[in-house]
Amino acid sequence: MAFLMKSMLSNQVKNLGLGGGGEESKEESTPSDPAAAAGMTREEYEEYQKQMVEEKMERDAAFAQKKAERACLRVHLREKYRLPKSEMDENQIQMAGDDVGLPEELQKMVEEDQEEEEDKDSILAQLQNIQNMDMDAIKEKAQATFTEIKQAAEQKCSVM
């Protein structure tokens, strides 16, 4: 109880600015040198700061590279599906130094997709598709179209 009263009264006195300089002496005892505050010598602290700056630069460069790779992927997909281009993606690629390509895994996937599309476009693939078609349905459709054309011609032409 005495502790509670003492802390309440001392806080009130400190707020008024009348003495109670206990905290001021604590603030003065803290060193103004950040190296001393970290428990290092000046040289160690400077080396530590250099390492921190270098690590930050490496992280930023890696992040910019990843962003550029993603932008490159988006550009590739836009070209593939004939979508409008984005200037933001092109700017990210240029900021990374234009030496950005698709990651290896994505390049493999793209190559596989291209091979599949080429196979679908080849003559052999078209022949295989013909084998898979329902010939009876095609014959019926052709005959129905032929009869429709014949009827339309009979209505327009008095000779037939």
Image (spheres, rainbow, N blue to C red):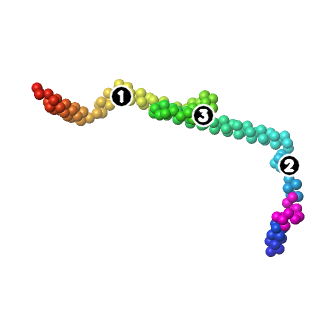
Amino acid at the residue labelled 3:
Gln
Q: Which mark is residue 42?
A: none
Amino acid at the residue labelled 1:
Ala
With 91 as the anchor, is 11 left or right in this view? right
Q: Which residue is mark 3?
A: 92
On-image quarter of the N terminus = bottom right
User: Which class describes the residues within 10 Å of circle 3: few (<14), some (14-19), or many (20+)?
Assistant: many
| Label 2: which secondary element | loop
Look at the image and give the residue range highlighted in magenta: 13-24
Check the image and report above or below for 120 versus 7. Answer: above
Check the image and report above or below for 126 versus 40. Answer: above
Q: Which residue is mark 2?
A: 32
The residue that appears at 61% across and 30% down in the rendered structure is 94
Query: Mark 3 and mark 2 in contact (Cβ < 8 Å)?
Result: no
Q: Quadrant of residue 11?
A: bottom right
Amino acid at the residue labelled 2:
Ser
Tell me, yes or no, whether the highlighted magenta stretch contains residue 112: no
With 23 as the anchor, is 156 left or right in this view? left
Query: Mark 1 and mark 2 in contact (Cβ < 8 Å)?
Result: no
In three-dimensional space, the C-alpha distance between marks 1 and 3, rounded to whole angstroms, equals 40 Å
Q: Which residue is mark 1?
A: 125
The residue that appears at 53% across and 34% down in the rendered structure is 86
| Closer-to-camera residue (84/3) | 84
| Label 3: which secondary element | helix
The residue that appears at 35% across and 25% down in the rendered structure is 123
In three-dimensional space, the C-alpha distance between marks 2 and 1, rounded to whole angstroms, equals 78 Å
User: Which class describes the residues within 10 Å of circle 2: few (<14), some (14-19), or many (20+)?
Assistant: few
